Image (cartoon, rainbow, N blue to C red):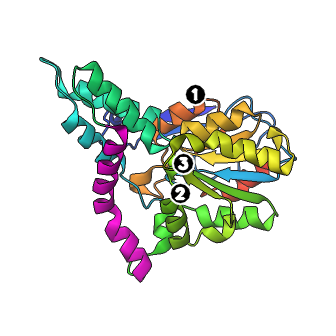
Amino acid sequence: MEEREDSRSLKHACVPSAGLTTSLFLRMRLPMVSTASFRGLVEFNPSFAPRRLIGHVLFDFDGTLSLIRQGWPDVMLPMFVDMLPKKNGEAEDEVRQMLFDDIMRLNGKQTIYQMIQFSERVKERGGEARDPLWYKKEYLRRLDERILHRIEGIAKGSLERDDFLVFGARALLDKLANRGLKLYLASGTDEPFVKKEAELLDLSRYFNEHIYGAKDDYKTFSKKMVIDRILRENRIEGAELLAFGDGYVEIENTKEVGGLAVAVASDEAHNGSGRMDEWKRRRLMGVGADICIPDYRDCEPLLQVLFP
Ligand SMILES: [Mg+2]
């Protein structure tokens, strides 16, 4: 195993608002797996083993395929910092770090869970919390302001559509579809937005009717429910499922049913940098991801490893 750590970037890993980027070079040589053909970074969990059985592939949306909502933590975090009652003598950095950890810990679940958690933080400080749905609406209003020009630019053609895909994503989707694998999309973002943004990015055609997102009644949707449905409707075992995600939920849920999970520690603010987001990498490997990649630059060698 060769390992190189960039001390500058590792320092940044502790700073919540610094674009969430860091680089950590880690390439493990496993006895059964050749990573020689990978040009970029890749990390394997020692438990990884190829699966010839895989026929169904689940993708998360934001941060895994789409970058339309890139920078969302830079909207959510300042809003929470502003709205949280302050304690005497508390350092702002500590508060930011606590809120940032809450946000990222829940990344991949429906947005409402981050708002529920924030309401709890307000209450534990003796504040009067609003309904989590109020916080969600206010957050989405602020986020919309930030991403509107992207959506309009892509729609009008003044912005390049594929610039809003995680680097190499379309080539991977094409290759998976050409292999005859069935593709699914599940997102913690509200379903109407996911469908609209998938269409805008010309991704709907890979997933057809299998695009699922959060519902107003948040208890009626979860990624676990989507996974259970895929297994049930196709009468398959979890071992036949492969998932790609940058949030712990899809990785954890996939591992729970015995599936294979590829963590995408995407560097959203610098798409194509080839660096891994260290916060994501640590979190996703921590919940049992089999493989971790920064993006899809190595989709061909990755597929050779997955389907030898
Ligand atoms: Mg995501």
- Measuring from the top left, give residue 89's x and y in whole percent: 12, 17
**In this rendering, does residue 250 appear at all?**
yes
- Residue at 46%, 65% (x, y): give it: 164
Q: Residue farthest to the left?
A: 88
In-front residue for pair 215/88: 215
Q: Nearer the viewer, mark 2 or mark 1?
A: 2
Q: Is residue 153 magenta?
A: yes
Above or below, comparing residue 68 to residue 46 in the picture: below
Q: Nearer the viewer, mark 3 or mark 1?
A: 1
Q: Is residue 261 magenta?
A: no
Residue 260: quarter of image:
top right
- Measuring from the top left, give residue 179's x and y in whole percent: 81, 63
Is 5 placed left or right of 139 in the picture?
A: right
In three-dimensional space, the C-alpha distance between marks 2 and 3, rounded to whole angstroms, equals 26 Å
In three-dimensional space, the C-alpha distance between marks 2 and 1, rounded to whole angstroms, equals 28 Å
SS for tag 3? loop
SS for tag 2? helix
The reply to whether the C-beta atoms of the residues labelled 3 and 1 are less than 8 Å apart is no
Where is mark 3, residue-wise?
294
Which amino acid type is marked by label 2?
Answer: Glu
Where is mark 2, residue-wise?
191
The reply to whether the C-beta atoms of the residues labelled 2 and 3 are less than 8 Å apart is no
- Ligand 1 within 8 angstroms of badge 3 C-beta: no
Which residue range is magenta in the image? 131-157
Which amino acid type is marked by label 1?
Answer: Gly
- Residue at 33%, 60% (x, y): give it: 144
Which amino acid type is marked by label 3?
Answer: Pro
Give the numbered dot on residue 286. Answer: 1
Is 230 placed left or right of 117 in the picture?
A: right
